[in-house]
Image (tube, helix red, strand yellow):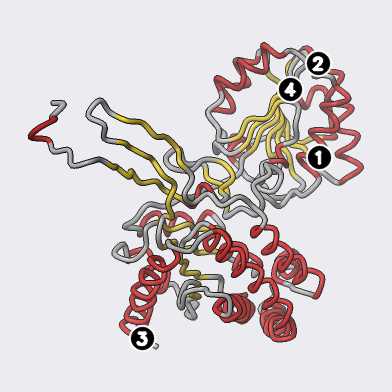
Amino acid sequence: MDKAQIKESILGMGAKARAAAYALAVLDTDQKNAILHAMAAGLREHRRDILDANALDIAAAEAHGLTAAMLDRLRLDAPRLETMAAGVEQVAGLPDPVGEVLADWTRPNDIHFEQIRVPIGVIGIIYESRPNVTSDAAVLCLKSGNATILRGGSEAIHSNQAIAAALQSAGETAGLPENAIQLIPFTDRESVRVMAGMDQWLDVIIPRGGKGLIETVVSLARMPVIKHYDGICHTYVDKEADLAMAVAIVDDAKTHKPGVCNALETLLVHRDVAAEFLPRIAAVFLEKGVEMRGDPRTLAILGDAATAATDEDWDTEYLDLILSIRVVDTMAEAVDHINTHSSRHSDCIVTADMARAESFMRRVDSACLFHNVSTRFSDGGEFGFGAEIGISTDKLHARGPMALRELTSYQYRIRGDGQTRTKCATT
């Protein structure tokens, strides 16, 4: 299919999604929850079709030499599919944000104002690798009353198509509007370009994936983009830290799951505790195979256990068992380092001094700030939001883990009794 045909097809999907969005906006909570339960049942009913489709993707990925880690992200099996279905049911159990009254007031002229949560409308989501994102994105958009157009990675095309088809067909049996969930069947880059340019149909676009994908979407998009580029997360071990606690937090943040955006990438340690703390955490890291790259003062303490950090290390998201380490003289120096090198994702202070913790949190400009808590808790599920659509490091509309509330906007509803500006003007 040539570029013109791809464009025509995707624009047609946009028009259908807009019609679906208007139908979704009037569904009540009970109706949406019934649809979600039907979707969960649909995933279970079509388990064989989805796993067969996934086997095609796995075979193609193996033939193209994808790494073991990438294959694991791609692979589905019966337990993972059941987890996906259970996740849909979990979303059904979450509070519905649509219709929430954010504020209400009455003016002296007896006109009553309400600010109400409403769906955004049509949300485009571009993502890579993980087929479970197809389900997560579709059901979160549905619960928040939005139509969605999904564009997954080429490596998961068969899996994504099977999942999206199961969700839409099963949902329709319970009242899901036609075309509420659409998956773009094209895997070439032209489909990304077309999506990013169809601002007449998409109200917002959310890219989930590597920095290259996100930069491409941002450079092309004609509608708002909600995103995060990197997860360069820091933990600062303060001079007032409980060092046993600090070891546990730093170990968890780095080694629990190093290939994710909320994993620790840079460790900052106050000079007053560096000589005691660094050998303790280094012993843990050496046992777990963590490569440590340190500044000169770190190297003076750890010797051959670490190698010299370069300027590039402070700005690197390793997504691996690699950690950069720096000794700082003051908390102010730690804050300055974080504000200079952080990706504004998630940063942590370990300290027993509440005043110092509060000062740190007021001065560090990141979406999520943790005091005596591993940055691995930067996650929608851990926040109690249920599934998340992603994590935003932007400052407008959404920041941090994005769940149902972040997939809504608001409108004003104004009620009166015949008031006109001519008779009761306030200005």
Give the amino acid at mark 4.
Val
Q: Position of residue 108 (x, y in %)?
A: 25, 25
**Secondary structure type for disc 1:** helix
Q: Residues within 10 Å of mark 2 (few under 14, many from 20)?
A: some
Looking at the rendering, in which quadrant would you find the C terminus? Answer: top left
Instruction: Check disc 4 and report the residue beneath it.
Output: 269
**Secondary structure type for disc 4:** strand
Instruction: Check disc 1 and report the residue beneath it.
Output: 252
Q: Is residue 168 visible?
A: yes
Asked where in the image residue 295 lies, by quadrant, the reply is top right
Residue drawn 57% across and 81% down? 169
Q: Residue furthest bottom?
A: 1
Circle 1/circle 3 CB separation < 8 Å: no
Q: Nearer the viewer, mark 1 or mark 4?
A: 1
The first of marks 3 and 2 along the sequence is 3
Q: Is residue 8 left or right of residue 409?
A: left
Q: Residues within 10 Å of mark 4 (few under 14, many from 20)?
A: many
Q: Nearer the viewer, mark 4 or mark 3?
A: 3
The first of marks 4 and 3 along the sequence is 3
Q: Position of residue 318 (x, y in %)?
A: 67, 47
Which label number is shown at residue 2? 3
| Whole-number angstrom distance, CA of label 1 to CA of label 3 | 49 Å
Q: Is residue 295 visible?
A: no
| Whole-number angstrom distance, CA of label 3 to CA of label 2 | 63 Å
| Whole-number angstrom distance, CA of label 1 to CA of label 4 | 16 Å
